[in-house]
Image (cartoon, helix red, strand yellow):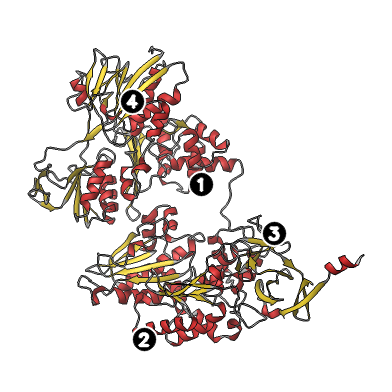
Amino acid sequence: MEARANTRIVVIGNGMVGYKFCEKLFSKNHTEQNFTVTVFGEEPRPAYDRVHLSSYFDGASADDLSLASVEWYAQQGITLYLSDPVVDIDRVQKTVRSHHGIVVGYDYLIFATGSAAFVPPIPGVEKKGVFVYRTIEDLELISEHAHHARKAAVLGGGLLGLEAAKALLDLGMEEAHVVEFAPRLMPRQIDEAGSEVLQAQLESLGLQIHLSMATDSILGQESIEGLIFKDGSQLPIDMLVISAGIRPRDELAKIAGLETHPRGGILVDDRLRTADPAIFAIGECALVHQMIYGLIAPGYEMAEVVVSQLLGAEKAFLPFDMSTKLKLIGTDVASFGDPFVKEPDCRTVRFENKAKGIYKRINISSDGRELLGGILVGDASQYNMLLQTTKSKTILPPDPEDLILGNRGSEETGAGVMNFPDDALICSCEAVSKGMICSEVENGNTTIDALKKSCKAGTGCGGCVPMVNDLIQGVLKKQGIYLRKVICEHFGHSRQELLDLMKINQVKTFGATIDLFGKGHGCEVCKPLVGSILASLWNENILHSDRATIQDSNDRFLANIQKGGTYSVVPRIPGGEITPEKLIVIGQVAQRFGLYTKITGGQRIDLFGAHVSDLPQIWEILIDAGFESGHAYGKSLRTVKSCVGSTWCRFGVQDSVSFAIEVEERYKGLRSPHKLKSAVSGCVRECAEAQSKDFGIIATEKGWNLYVCGNGGSKPQHAQLLATDVDKETCLRLIDRFLMFYIQTADPLTRTATWLNKMEGGINYLRAVVVDDLLEMGEQWEREMQELVNRFHCEWKEVVETPELRKRFTHFVNADQKDPSVAFEEMRGQIKVKDWQ
Amino acid sequence: MNNVSHVTERIIWHYACHIDDVPSEGGACALINGKQIAIFNLSRRGEWYATDNQCPHKQQMALSRGMTGCENDEPKVACPFHKKTFSLRTGAGINDGTLQIATFPVQVQEGKVFIGMQD
């Protein structure tokens, strides 16, 4: 193709593919040519990542989703008009006219108008509360409406529909439904058995799935009140999100007299040219090879094909592999090659594990030599490997079922990727091969972020990121840089290995631990870690034997060190319930020792500004009044927060305070890899915020729902449902198992949320271990927990009663005085420590 | 040797405490000449050290409550506030080279700990 020295290009549409066209045009143009590019976008903001749209409800902002800023377009010399769609094309004069009346001439015109949500002609779709799920503006409208909606449904159980369903869950709908016309979910990607497994997973997360349902009409006056189905049944809802497929935006092409398909799409050849040689169409608006490619990777490839032609190269768009892998509401779903081919055209191998929510299917050619395609639900860790095997027509081993039944260990996967040929395509969105990634890693780009910058791998759909990670590990390992996760220079073991060694050998001191399993004399990393393991294993007083000096400062003085070197004191107030008499004692202690008092986030009272030498006396008074240590200083159970529950609250369905006290009494003092927080709510209103805790309990009409691995703090994360409607005894048994599993396997200073995030198989695996007793460890863990519970002691009571422990609580060993450098100021009628410099 | 240098090198030994007053593998604070001194008992190595009690990072009187340990055989203490580590031998900051604390010689005789300070 010949282009003039200054070529005018107009791009209609500023979605992901339109943006990618611009990016490729300017990054690949090493010729003498000049391009004057004008882009018209209908939306008010520049192109953003529509694939990860649902992360908007997870906290991602419009900026986070943005692909490039307005300044980027300016720097490239691109003229960008936003909120200004093209309304007319004069193919003779070669000009376009925008809605605002801007007229621009072109030598080449690129349609990248994408698609719109397809809205089926159901009576009532115009009612308030009915939305589509396509743009950030749609999301803003949905989010706004969700404030006064409780029950919502998604119409359409395909890929986008399930993404939208996740959004409904994130928005906190009391009921979230998915209505699908076909007899299975994701009918274009997975088969019925896969759909069943996926359905069970989604239902366990609170989605209600209705299959084979044809919608007749939408109920309600002005606003939606429900759906009526063809079989006469009804579903009462106050919000509906329609996600019934896409329709190519070809209306402008029609007006311009270009040929379009009756069911939508601008007709183009395999060079992506329309019948008018100056006009191209790319992305979801283009109909090529008799189909619409509704995925991002082929859209980017189309941009590449047109850019190559404009730069003078010959390139055609070849039939594109439609394999996909995605994470739907935490569940992996993937399909590759031909997922549906049936016997006798192939041999099919299926694997199903309902307890873990895993389904795998591979289709092997009849002669057993090649992989034709397959489906993965619940665990797609082998996706990249299987996809490459399919694409490269690798000759299969004699037992091809090993492909899905073999070792799932990450090392195995890593080795597998490293065995791919160098030209194997890893990132199909950006066409980055294994060889390119490996050489980037060898050049020092050893993180995902660095690779995204240096070669763009992983910047598209993100599906290849796990494999890119494996390549980084693989290359580093080859170079001998790979490091085991050891504790520090004194211990060549992981925390879990050391715990097992100490348990088997019944080790009870730091000295014995380092003599037997380590070297040197320890440091501030390994000492508290060993202290924590000793406490988790044996629950003996942490200050006895040689254990006092291996504790972090807070544990060593059983109080929290604060600015200025004084300590804060937190007595345990189980469930946040306290008598007036005890409140008075706390007040008296604070008055007598001049302490600043504040209510904590965990429903108890913190007393600040205590000199180290006053601590034993303060605790003597508190213990006399019936208080115990609150362990606010330890990596251990902090509080079990509660709402007032059914004893007083008119909504409460269970006595949450009594259960919170029972839970706190059971696990108080339990030492763990990091602090533990819990809460019990008396009904679904969740006033105790149990879903932000390491383990949280919410009352139901029939019993209790147990949630685990939530987190507040800097990276908030909702807890996930582990068990439903269990009685108290079962609930405590499950918590016993969960906590022992966490204590025995987590890395040091890892909260339960992070522990779960790193766990292979995620919540499904955790549930299989804790609830279904997959490892048959349940009974042992319950017994071990009971032993720890039986050995509980109040650490402060022992210190108060033991002279040799008590005498350590002094500032000077040789003078009976307090630290003279401590100084306070006054603020709002209480003390405040002087700011440090 | 002239008189002047003789005077500057004169060290006075101050009794601080009994050896049992400083926990094994840990520290304690003594008040000597109105100055707060941190004393460390590294019993596994059979070594005693003394330094400033004040951490120079945020001027907190806390090093005696810090955790002792070693890094490549260099004995060290970590401040409980922000885990700044210091060599007990030289007083040099290990994970923050801009920091420095003073160190003092220690003698142990008949169960008694003495700290040496220049007169």
- Where is residue B22? Give x, y as percent: 67, 76
Q: Which residue is mark 2?
A: A581
Q: Residues within 10 Å of mark 3 (few under 14, many from 20)?
A: some
Which residue shows up at 39% across the image and 77% down it?
A573
Q: Secondary structure at mark 1?
A: helix
| Label 3 – label 4 distance at C-alpha | 66 Å
Q: Is residue A646 left or right of residue A233?
A: right
Quadrant placement of the N terminus of chain B: bottom right
Q: Secondary structure at mark 3?
A: loop
Subunit ID for the residue under disc 3: B
Q: Secondary structure at mark 2?
A: helix
Q: Are marks 3 and 2 in contact (CB under 8 Å)?
A: no
Q: Which residue is mark 1?
A: A411
Q: Is residue A675 left or right of residue B23?
A: left
Kindly identify the amino acid type of the residue bearing the numbered disc 4: Pro
Kindly identify the amino acid type of the residue bearing the numbered disc 1: Glu
Q: Nearer the viewer, mark 3 or mark 4?
A: 3
Q: Are marks 2 and 4 in contact (CB under 8 Å)?
A: no
Kindly identify the amino acid type of the residue bearing the numbered disc 3: Ala
Q: Which residue is mark 3?
A: B92
Disc sitting over residue A42 in the figure? none
Q: Is residue A698 above or below residue A616?
A: above
Q: Residues within 10 Å of mark 2 (few under 14, many from 20)?
A: few
